[in-house]
Amino acid sequence: METEIVSVDNDMDNSISYQRAVDMLKNGGVVAFPTETVYGLGALATDEAAVQRIFEAKGRPSDNPLIVHIGNQEDVEKYAEDIPENASKLMDAFWPGPLTLVFHKRPGVIAENVTPGFGTVGLRMPDHPVALTLLRTLDGPLAAPSANRSGKPSPTEAAHVMTDLNGRIPLIVDGGKTGVGVESTVLDMTANPPEILRPGGVTREMIEDVIGPVRAESKSASVTDEVAPRAPGMKYMHYAPESPLFVIQPDESVIREAVMQLKSEGKRVAVIGPDDFDIKEADWYFPVGPLHDNGAMAGNLYGAIRQCDSTDADLILAAATDSEGVGTAVMNRLLKAADGKRYNGY
Ligand code: TXA
Ligand code: MG
């Protein structure tokens, strides 16, 4: 299969490109498209055979549930039931946006393999003009995980999707680099109080300002599980860079000393860190934005990890950040990529 890229990232009339994508989706095909968080790999969520193609293209274990994307808030009622009042408040406050809400599933509408064995469904309305135009032209729900091969970081550019899925999917809709850069917050509204299963662009503080206290995943679970699954014994593989990654204190001289120590042991070292640091001793330095700018770090982190993968570094050091704003989500993803490893116990 040849993978085609159509660009809609300009002011031209793109209706023909959207129509192509919609026709493919209606015929059971999969299409990669940008959202405000990361690129998604979409299929019509009511079409079981189409959804199956997502798992095949990604090489994804089929017991990990997919998020269903919708183009209008009213559509929630079509796919979910028992929607609590708090959820309506959150949708009014944060949709479209990087917040996935898990509800009880309305039976018989969404294909079984979207949320295999779960009585729930995760819904979100993405805040991206391309995703919204696609969803509204399609006039149907899109099941869409991140558009990476299983085990790779989520794609934040069409080129990342191409690297992972070239020859495995028919079409990539290119809308440029995504904004947020880490995946949506997943909030389980069937729990009482609601529980954050995955931190993301909408922070705990933002949610609590609207509906009061919620539960957040424990620190240990955040390292070992993709998301705390609602069934025992289920653990999903998360991505890991090609070389071991260690989280390190965001301090220029600490990082420089670590690099020099590792180099003296004959290792080649890649560093992911703020723009402000100047660490010439590193074999590769991938800047992810100004120091303490967690938004910039979220936007650039996955791209930087992919750049590390294209080097022949023996080891990656990635500077930590604080938990301000999207920082909690950034550290959650960084510690997953590190499999919990911290340099010198930091
Ligand atoms: O930002 C995002 O959420 C991106 C874009 C494409 O929308 N999508 C994304 O999908 O990250 P994916 O499949 O890579 O991650 C979805 C996460 C998984 O960890 C899954 O376990 C959880 O959401 N999830 C989905 N439905 C769920 C449900 N019904 N109950 C519990 N967790 C659910
Ligand atoms: Mg993913």
Image (cartoon, rainbow, N blue to C red):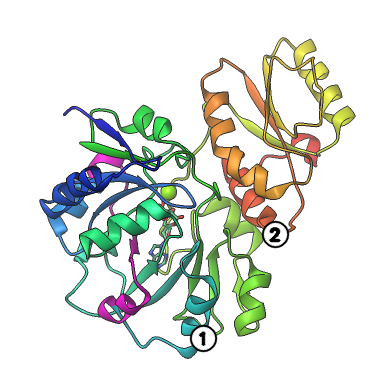
| Of pointers 1 and 2, the one earlier in the residue sequence | 1
Q: Give the magenta part as a residue range.
A: 56-79
Q: Secondary structure at mark 2?
A: loop
Q: Which residue is at a point 79% across and 40% down the rendered structure image? A: 291
Q: Which residue is at a point 66% across and 59% down the rendered structure image? A: 219
As drawn, the label of residue 275 is none
Asked whether residue 149 is drawn in magenta, I would say no
Q: Provide the residue designation for mark 1.
A: 86
Q: Is the Cβ of the residue at disc 1 closer than 8 Å to that at disc 2?
A: no
Q: Is residue 178 visible?
A: yes
Whole-percent x, y for residue 47 in the image = 15, 60
Q: Which residue is at a point 27% across and 68% down the rendered structure image? A: 117
Whole-percent x, y for residue 197 in the image = 52, 65
Asked whether residue 72 is drawn in magenta, I would say yes
Q: Provide the residue designation for mark 2.
A: 325
Q: Is residue 61 left or right of residue 94?
A: left
Q: Is residue 63 visible?
A: no
32 up-or-down from 183: above or below: above
Q: Secondary structure at mark 1?
A: helix
Q: Determine which quarter of the picture holds residue 264.
A: top right
Q: How many marks?
A: 2
Q: Determine which quarter of the picture holds residue 169.
A: top left
The amino acid beneath tag 2 is Gly
